[in-house]
């Protein structure tokens, strides 16, 4: 079992920055691919990016150049650094872990463990 707890969300003006953290406990974290997803009201949950156990990360085009995913295996924590935030980035953000692959997946169904989410609101 893996428990995930996100933190760092909040209200920020457009152009601002936030860093989300996802603290993991339980199963060997360092070997788990991790993903970040977000869900805006009335919309489906969408993949933001992910990071493999080696530290190699990937982001979707809508956040490339603005969001960075990293991990600190010593602290059992994954980070989502968000810069140049836009109102359309407003959503609940979730981290997820999968034990079924060696690389992060863009599909939420491939993830076994989820955090409770943290709200990010970007004002215009």
Image (cartoon, rainbow, N blue to C red):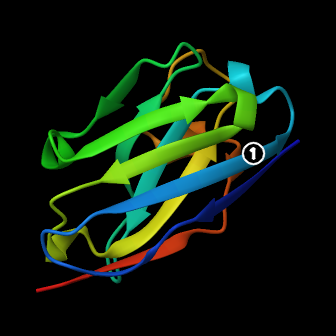
Q: Residues within 10 Å of mark 1 (few under 14, many from 20)?
A: many
Residue 65, x across and y down, in percent: 14, 40
**In the rendered view of the protein, which quadrant contains the N terminus?**
top right
Q: Residue at x 68, y 27 (%)?
A: 73
Helix, strand or loop at label 1? It is strand
Residue 30: quarter of image: top right
Image point 13% across, 69% down: which residue?
15
Q: Is residue 38 left or right of residue 29?
A: left
- Give 15 or 102, whichever is nearer the viewer: 15
Asked whether residue 116 appears in the rendered view, the answer is yes
Whether 113 is drawn above or below 74: the answer is below
Residue 97 position, x and y percent, is 64, 39
Question: Looking at the image, is 23 positioned above or below residue 35?
Answer: below
User: Residue 54: x percent and y percent?
Assistant: 54, 13
Q: Image quadrant of residue 31?
A: top right
Compared to residue 51, the image places residue 67 above or below, namely: below
Between residues 11 and 44, which one lies in front from this camera angle? 11
Instruction: For residue 45, say whether it is visible.
Output: no
From this view, report whether residue 102 is shown above or below residue 107: above
Query: In which quadrant will I find the C terminus?
Result: bottom left
The residue to which callout 1 is attached is: 24
Residue nearest the observer in this picture, 69 or 100: 69
Q: Residue at x 56, y 54 (%)?
A: 21
Q: How many marks?
A: 1
**Residue 45 vs residue 94: left or right?**
left
The location of residue 27, given as percent across then percent down, is: 86, 32
């Amino acid at each position: 079992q893996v428990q995930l707890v996100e933190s760092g969300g909040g209200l920020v003006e457009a152009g601002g920055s936030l860093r989300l953290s996802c603290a993991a406990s339980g199963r060997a974290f360092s070997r788990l691919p991790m993903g970040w997803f977000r869900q805006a009201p009335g919309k489906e949950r969408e993949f933001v990016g992910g990071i493999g156990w080696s530290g190699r990360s990937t982001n979707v085009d809508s956040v490339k150049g603005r969001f960075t995913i990293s991990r600190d295996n010593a602290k059992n924590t994954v980070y989502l650094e968000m810069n140049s935030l836009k109102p359309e980035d407003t959503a609940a953000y979730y981290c997820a872990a999968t034990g079924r692959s060696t690389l992060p997946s863009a599909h939420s169904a491939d993830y076994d463990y989820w955090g409770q989410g943290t709200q990010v609101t970007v004002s215009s």
